[in-house]
Image (spheres, rainbow, N blue to C red):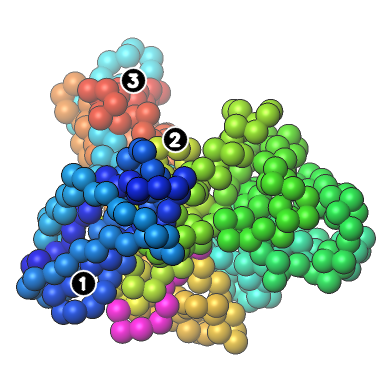
Amino acid sequence: MEANHHYSLSAWLQVSSGTGAIVKATFKAPNGAFIAGGSIVAKSGCWSMLKGGMTSYTSGPAELFFEADGAAVDIYVDSVSLQPFSFPEWDAHASISTSKTRKSTIKILARQRSSGEPLANAKLRINLLRPGFPLGNAMTPEILSNPAYEQWFASRFTVATFENEMKWYATEPRQNLEDYRVPDAMLRLAERHGIKVRGHNVVWDDPKTQMNWVESLSPDRLRAAVEKRVRSVVSRYAGKVIAWDVVNENLHGDFYESKLGADVSAQLYSQVGQIDRQALLFMNEYNTLEVPMDANALASKYMAKMNQIRFYPGNLGMKLAVGLESHFGAPNIPFMRATLDMLAQLMVPIWLTEVDVVAGPNQAGYLEAVLREGYGHPAVQGMVMWAAWHAKGCYVMCLTDNGFRNLPVGDVVDKLIAEWRTHPLEVTTGCNGAAELDLVHGEYNFTVTHPDLESPTVHTLTVDAASSSYASLSSDLTLDIKV
């Protein structure tokens, strides 16, 4: 292996017996470190593809091992591929993907409304009103009484997830005593700033997060309480949130399945979807993207669970989405890309929903790598960080200090926001009244000035993937200028 290279791994695997064994790929790097490269459920009699990889920071010989987790089986391996990419090569690929995915080349035609004649040499000033790619952060109730926090948040993010305030234990800590005052107020604040809100969450499958009164219910009473919870929170915020984390973390948790049956998750998605037909319904999970060796959260298991929900009677056509929490230590970027590629096969939107990186000397660099990888992947349609501000300290990652001065990770976020909003500020039309522009997706104001116009005119235009010259040769987006 060579230093400062990413390695993409793929291999076909099967085992000698059994219906499914977890087979793990582990690298022994040149520096002697053992690095998890990926995992797959391998079966007897059919081949399964493992995809993953690792990053080498040193040069020298390396080893690759395949082992079955807790199973006495032979492992058959075929068509192993390990492709090296220098860091510049990897970054160049991501940059090309970003341009294709997040920008469109459009042609603007400025003409007089009365005659239809083109306006040659018209000046167009271009102002991005709202970026098209949703980038957000977790929000805490401190924002309701802290104008500095409000200004800092609203000037950066277009999406918010309430850290805890919409969760069941926050809105109904005692049975039948619901209190939505805090999330209601937070939602009103978000709406004032045009910030979209994700509904987090309807129920949480982790047994450790259940309230005492919920744990004590009989199965029949628990089902009634859950159905009441769904009606209460989803009806209250239907049309006001853009998404729901329906059964949070139900690859790792099984509180509701253990008490109400294996189909309860699919049934809850159905109930939420019937009440709120516009919101995306997320399967929100951790370690699928972060930890190659978490047997509970493998991409193949994630896909199987989503398909169980999708193909449950009555659920076809439901607006499902992949939610990847993205709580990273040291990110395995090749594994991250391989996992996103696999999950893209579900053909539903993918969001990184709770991005953070543990503190350490490389925290800022790791965060930038994760955000760039997500932004550059064509299947990823939004990212939300889990860096909710608290005066007493953040969950894992703070972007600022208590004076809202950036910490190093905050500098990374601001740098990327500025980069991802960069666009031409002014262009002059040619003799045919046309100008071609390469624009990041979003909503724009175009201010047109010309000697034949009595005053500047302003036109609003949304540029998105449908405007892309990658989908067609070009799109003529006509501005009719009235003189």
Q: Is residue 358 magenta?
A: yes
* Residue at mark 3 to residue at mark 2: CA–CA distance: 43 Å
N-term mark: 3 or 1: 1
Taking the spot 44% from the left edge, 35% from the top edge, the residue there is: 347
Highlighted magenta segment, given as a residue range: 352-362
Q: Is residue 130 visible?
A: no
Pick the residue in front: 284 or 108: 284
* Residue at mark 1 to residue at mark 2: CA–CA distance: 35 Å
Q: Position of 359 compared to 402: left or right?
A: left
Q: Position of 352 compared to 52: left or right?
A: right
> Quick one: label 3, few (<14), some, or many (20+) residues within 10 Å?
some
Residue 65 image offset from top left, x and y in percent: 24, 64
Residue position for label 2: 347
Residue position for label 3: 112
Q: Position of 172 compared to 472: left or right?
A: right
Pick the residue in front: 156 or 21: 21
Between disc 1 and disc 2, the foreground one is 1
Q: Secondary structure at mark 1?
A: strand
Residue position for label 1: 28
Q: Secondary structure at mark 2?
A: loop
Pick the residue in front: 121 or 327: 327
> Quick one: label 2, few (<14), some, or many (20+) residues within 10 Å?
few
Q: Is residue 278 visible?
A: yes
Residue type at tag 3: Gln
